[in-house]
């Protein structure tokens, strides 16, 4: 009798235990595990902890290998860590899974800007525009296009691109100041520099340069030279 009662109780208790485990996160679907890892990874990236963010996004990819967004976020983490080959590989995988996402295609263009390859970058940016004819309404488009021309030392084209950004952030204004200064348009460079400081009073050219994930130090030095010539503070 007692054995039968115990078994009946166990039959009622086990499902309740499983339900409690599932609700507590101990038993989760691959999608739930991936989502949790991605959320943790994004928080770590915000905290500038790229190494730990990479681990979280790799967990997300492992849980859901065909998740384009997980691969995309993994690429961003690798880029933040300055690890370029896996950044490119992860982004290519994201695009294989979702080739019609203009934002991710444009991110590939941005990645090639930081690799110092403006010709490849412009090709990816054109592809994003083909996918979305109205993509040039996105500030990202003009920021990346300006970066392409800046790296290629085509300052007049870079100035035209940055000037068309619908929302002129302090970042875009800083690059605009650098472009004008390097093109010897000193008065315009100083105007942009003043706007940078209005938008970001604590601005430091060295801090901005350190954050820009250029692969080659020559590109970072190029940016610093322009910002310094524009009169922005160290």
Image (spheres, helix red, strand yellow):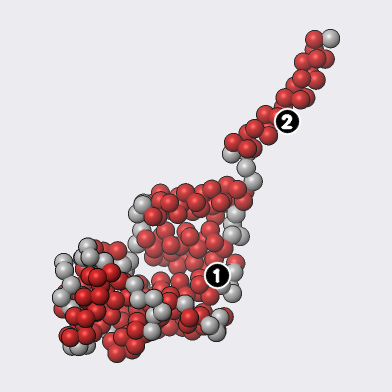
Q: Is residue 10 visible?
A: yes
Q: Position of residue 227 (x, y in %)?
A: 20, 75
Q: Are marks 2 and 1 in contact (CB under 8 Å)?
A: no
Give the side of residue 187 with respect to residue 117, left or right: left
- Disc 1 marks which residue? 95
- Label 2 neighbourhood size at 10 Å, few (<14), some (14-19), many (20+)? few
Q: Measure how far apart labels 2 and 1 are at the Cα level.
A: 41 Å
Tell me the mark number nearer the camera, choosing from 2 and 1: 2
Write the residue at 34% across / 62% down.
82
Asked if residue 15 lies left or right of residue 35, the reply is right
The residue shown at (76%, 20%) is 9
Residue 4 sits above or below residue 219 on the image:
above
Residue in the image at 39% along x and 80% along y? 165
Q: Residues within 10 Å of mark 1 (few under 14, many from 20)?
A: many
Residue at numbered disc 2? 15
Q: How many marks?
A: 2
Spot the residue most to the front: 198
- Location of the N terminus by quadrant is top right
Residue 61 in the image, given as x and y percentages of width and height: 54, 55
Determine which quarter of the picture holds residue 204: bottom left
Q: Nearer the viewer, residue 61 or 26?
A: 26
Residue 205, image x and y in percent? 21, 68
Give the residue at the far bottom of this rendering: 156
Is the residue 219 above or below the residue 41 in the image? below
């Amino acid at each position: 009798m007692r054995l039968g009662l115990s078994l009946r109780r166990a039959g009622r208790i086990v499902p309740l235990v499983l339900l409690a485990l599932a609700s507590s996160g101990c038993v989760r679907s691959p999608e739930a595990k991936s989502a949790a890892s991605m959320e943790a990874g994004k928080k770590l990236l915000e905290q500038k902890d790229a190494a730990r963010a990479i681990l979280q996004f790799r967990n997300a990819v492992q849980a859901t290998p065909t998740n384009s967004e997980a691969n995309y976020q993994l690429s961003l983490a690798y880029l933040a860590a300055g690890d370029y080959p896996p950044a490119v590989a992860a982004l290519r995988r994201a695009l294989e899974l979702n080739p019609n996402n203009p934002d991710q295609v444009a991110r590939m263009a941005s990645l090639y800007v930081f690799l110092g390859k403006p010709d490849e970058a412009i090709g990816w940016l054109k592809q994003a525009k083909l996918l979305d004819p109205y993509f040039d309404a996105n500030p990202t488009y003009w920021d990346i296009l300006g970066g392409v021309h800046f790296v290629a030392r085509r300052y007049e084209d870079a100035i035209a691109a940055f000037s068309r950004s619908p929302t002129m952030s302090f970042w875009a204004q800083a690059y605009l100041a650098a472009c004008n200064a390097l093109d010897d348009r000193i008065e315009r460079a100083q105007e942009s520099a003043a706007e940078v400081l209005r938008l970001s009073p604590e601005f430091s050219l060295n801090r901005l340069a350190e954050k820009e994930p250029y692969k080659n130090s020559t590109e970072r030095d190029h940016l610093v030279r322009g910002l310094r010539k524009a009169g922005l503070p160290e």
